[in-house]
Image: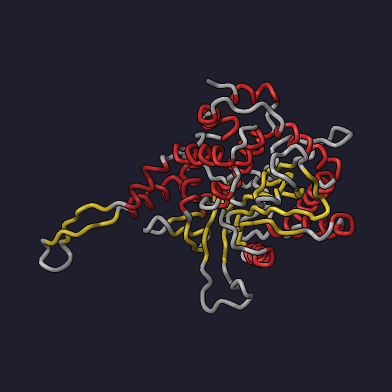
Amino acid sequence: MKQAKSMSNLMREAALYKRSTCDLVAPTTKLHFLDDASTLSVDGLEGQLSDHAFGQMCRSLKVPTEYMLKTRASTFRFLDSAHGSGREWIDKSRADLVAAHLNSWLDHNDPRMQLVRGIEYTTALDGSNIIGEPPRDWRAYLSNHYFAFDSADMLERTLQVCDDVAHRFGKVVWASGDISQDGMRVKLVFPGLSREVKRSRRVGDIVQWGLYLNNNEVGLGTWGVRGFVEFLVCTNGMVSTRKLVDQAGKPLVMNRRHVGPAQDMSTDVRWDTDTRRLQRDAQLSMLRDTIAHILQPDVLEQEVQVFDRAAESVLSRNPFSTVERLAKTESLTGKGGLSESETNAIFARYIEDDDRSQFGLAQAICSHNITANLTYSRATQFEKLAYNVISLSAPQWERYALAA
């Protein structure tokens, strides 16, 4: 798993993206492509539209995204009669045709208010000012109902809560993290929230409990917080996917959609209105309360019970069949399942570790041998898969373990 960024670097980058945000709400009639079909003008303010945002716009206009991307990148042979001998063939881009097509739809469809999320870099990561015209990227094309929730605000509030409980659980420790202009994933653990998995075959298998934060700022998912557990013997971890509840039955997993009231302002909306601040504060309060619940010691006790049960489960009769069936179960692995190479790698680790229990398979899935060369996003998916496996009920596990 690639995790080169420290907590301090993560916080600096989160702050940079927040202060560089350039969010505009405008009617579609104020949007116009330049001839390269990549530069979008939003009421006169130009920026480069990412492929992700380009796809979002195409889907909104109900035009085929792949066709538009392919056409924009293609060329055709053209007889240049305006230069030279007039008989020279040149390669001419089709981008201007795509621009004209999209501009026609933008101009003639019923006008709609759209949120165009941008990043305008006026300062560098070290805080120094950028000389000249600041580069601007349009990173998302969204409904004006989209609730823009900054990763920097989420991270700051989380660390405030962590500081509040430091006297009970120790100073929070950064396990790993990743941030970009599109989103954030952060894993934190507490030295004082440690327990032993007594039935593990590995002697002294200690786990630390903490938090997994996720946020997406370009319309690709929810933002929320879950429990995270790190195994100190091998320093791998699992992201909890179990629906935790407190004693009153209140859910402890928070996943929120980026949805709010419609924004009807014309352009250059910086989200500094009282209404937006109240929305943000309400969401941050929910985040604080959820974290406080997740960090209760009895929640960790519940998790350790899950690990202990998995450690004494029936052993896999045929490890390859177990892993192969798992790889094809999308309810556990996610859409698309596991690739052949991923399946083979998990099987090899499962055999090498010589622990054919449910706990052993989960450990194989999230081991460093598997996640070391994955992107942070894919490695986190494997950590969720490992937890999905370890939290299977005994009858569910037996369907995999006793497979012929």
In the displayed structure, would residue 241 be above or below residue 183?
above
In-front residue for pair 15/171: 171
The answer to whether residue 140 of the structure is visible from this angle is yes
What residue sits 68% from the left and 42% below the top? 257
In-front residue for pair 144/158: 158
What residue sits 75% from the left and 53% below the top? 189
The answer to whether residue 282 of the structure is visible from this angle is no
What colouring method underlies this structural image?
Answer: secondary structure
Left or right: where 221 falls relative to 306: left
Expressed as whole percent of the image width and height from the top left, the position of residue 210 reads: 76, 50
Expressed as whole percent of the image width and height from the top left, the position of residue 349 reads: 54, 41
Expressed as whole percent of the image width and height from the top left, the position of residue 90 reads: 19, 59
What residue sits 68% from the left and 29% below the top? 392
In-front residue for pair 259/199: 199
What residue sits 68% from the left and 21% below the top? 395
Expressed as whole percent of the image width and height from the top left, the position of residue 149 reads: 69, 53
Left or right: where 64 falls relative to 305: left
In-front residue for pair 351/31: 351
